[in-house]
Amino acid sequence: MKSMTQSPLQMARSSYQPKLPSALKGNVVLKEGANTESVADQSEIKQLFPNTYGMPLITFEPGDKKEYTTVGVGVILSGGQAPGGHNVISGLYDGLKALNPNNKLYGFLGGPIGLVDHEYVELDEEIVNEYRNTGGFDIIGSGRTKLEEEWQYEKGAEICKKLGINAIVIIGGDDSNTNACVLAEYYLQKKTGIQVIGCPKTIDGDLKNELIETSFGFDTACKVYSELIGNIQRDANSAKKYWHFIRLMGRSASHITLECALQSQPNICIVSEEVEAKNMTLNDVVEDIVKVIVHRSTYGLNFGTILIPEGLIEFIPAMKTLIAELNELLAHNEDFNALNTDDEKREYVKGLLTPDSHQVYRSLPKGIAKQLTLDRDPHGNVQVSLIETEKLLIEMVAKRLAQLKANSIYKGKFSAINHFFGYEGRCAIPSNFDADYTYSLGYTASVLISEGKTGYMSSVRNLTEPASEWIAGGVPITMMMNMERRHGKMKPVIQKALVLLDGAPFKYFEKYREHWADERSSYIYPGPIQYYGPTEVCDQPTRTLLLEQGK
Ligand code: FBP
């Protein structure tokens, strides 16, 4: 028998034709809206981006046929994988070829470093076809190198000149799109003739605003995690013996955790943004969990599910102060890097912290203390995916329950299992929503480029309506920026969108969470993503998006 190279689903997906907004199906005309301002720190941002600040919003509408000059485009996948990246590239490729069959597309390899090191591949029909509607970023690879030095921009310009590239598309999250904005400004200032367009990617869902309704990948990743959570809940409800502590990716923002809670209705869901707003300590978080465990135990229910956002630790005020101190202290610290053992590193750090942070640092289990001092990512962020908060919470909850048991307040049995869901969902086969959205984003980028635009992010909105009614266009990236402290210095960056406590998704959760926590449980078992079948099963966007848009 011949061995298979693809599953039947993979084969079926390769011929799926993603849906496009009506305006992109024929000839397009650009409509410019009002000039824009940055979300905050307007004078600083304007000064730093004199050429790209204040540009108007752009929307596409059906128009007359137009001849476009030939362009060469280079595309970069940046940062963590998100389902749909390959479709941004196929949409970009198809759009470029539809606008002018002589257009060329190059992929820079391994993320932004490919532009600097001149590692690239020309993307042709055969390569693109192989990756249509698939998950992953393996078509050209991804990386987290930060483009921030003039010599890197110059190396980029050099290869663009050599290959006849007029535009670069950077598919990335808030940090990578910040880089895209800086690069666009630099290339304009230097009159290189190279345009830069960004594309909103990240499973974390924290790159969004009124005009960028969601980042791609959030939909698929949340559906995969919710399926897994639902399966665990069914198991817990059947075996009735474990409390499952489930940490979910998402960096600082709790969007993924909240969306999974809305889809699966666990017994407990912690939202970091609420923890911060209520100025809660780690002990307060533990007490809240313990209360639910004790309550359910009185009904003989010694099991349940708890969702924990991976960024939780950064939102506990005392921990936040400690992390901020560690960030400053460890930025380019050769002395610290030269130390060999964990004990030496811990002692070194302790000696430099303020008394309050010293106290907090000392109280942490050794493993967590070590995880807090691991290398920052190239953008200066703590790598929260490496901090095992779920284990810390299990340890603290078990301790507290033991105390209550000693006082005969708790008579239940506590057995916990820890989970961390992140990598399981980042390269899943994109849902129909993500497949259509990403293809449209890529196609939109091709039009922005052909129209000579730079410093824009590709935007497709009205996403809770059928794809034919989606509105495509461009949003100036400077519009999303503000000044923040990074690596010990004030820098212009795209403002991260955290969970809004007065937003509809959180309000919905707040209304029902007590009911989900008590003895009745209201578990939902979402099941796997469906690609073929009725629209209400296969084409639904996230609950977050539906609630945000009043649906
Ligand atoms: P991006 O912000 O680059 O999209 O990455 C998202 C993410 O999956 C986070 O949720 C997670 O904290 C991080 O990447 C993990 O990084 P790595 O892939 O380097 O382990």
Image (spheres, helix red, strand yellow):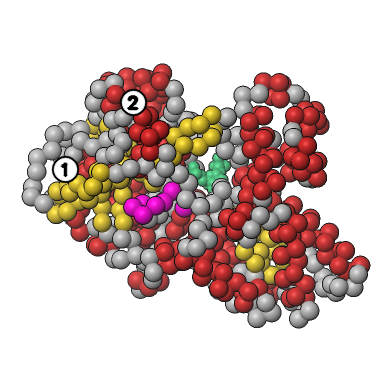
Q: Is residue 252 magenta?
A: no
User: How far across and how far down the image is residue 522, in percent?
Assistant: 59, 77
Closer to viewer: mark 1 or mark 2: 2
Question: How crowded is the residue under tag 1: few (<14 C-alpha within 10 Å), some, or many (20+)?
Answer: many
Q: Answer above or below: position of 318 versus 13.
A: above
The quarter of the image holding the C terminus is: bottom left
Residue situated furthest front in the rendering: 43
Q: In the drawing, does residue 133 fall left or right of residue 353?
A: left
Q: Is residue 160 visible?
A: no
Disc 2 residue type (three-letter): Tyr
What is the spatial separation of the Cα atoms under label 1 and label 2, in whole angstroms?
A: 27 Å
Q: Nearer the viewer, residue 34 or 452?
A: 34
Q: Is residue 207 magenta?
A: yes
Q: Is mark 1 within 8 Å of ligand 1?
A: no
Question: How crowded is the residue under tag 2: few (<14 C-alpha within 10 Å), some, or many (20+)?
Answer: some
Q: Main secondary structure of the magenta part?
A: loop
User: Are circles 1 and 2 on residues that touch, CB within 8 Å?
Assistant: no
Q: Quadrant of residue 50?
A: top left
User: How far across and how far down the image is residue 422, in percent?
Assistant: 57, 51
User: How far across and how far down the image is residue 241, in percent?
Assistant: 75, 71
Residue position marked by numbered label 1 in the rendering: 99
Stretch of the chain drawn in magenta: 205-212
Residue in the image at 63% along x and 50% along y: 315
Residue in the image at 41% along x and 18% along y: 151
Residue position marked by numbered label 2 in the rendering: 186
Secondary element at image label 2 = helix
Residue in the image at 83% along x and 65% along y: 401
Residue in the image at 18% along x and 39% along y: 451
Q: In the drawing, does residue 378 fall left or right of residue 494?
A: right
Secondary element at image label 1 = helix
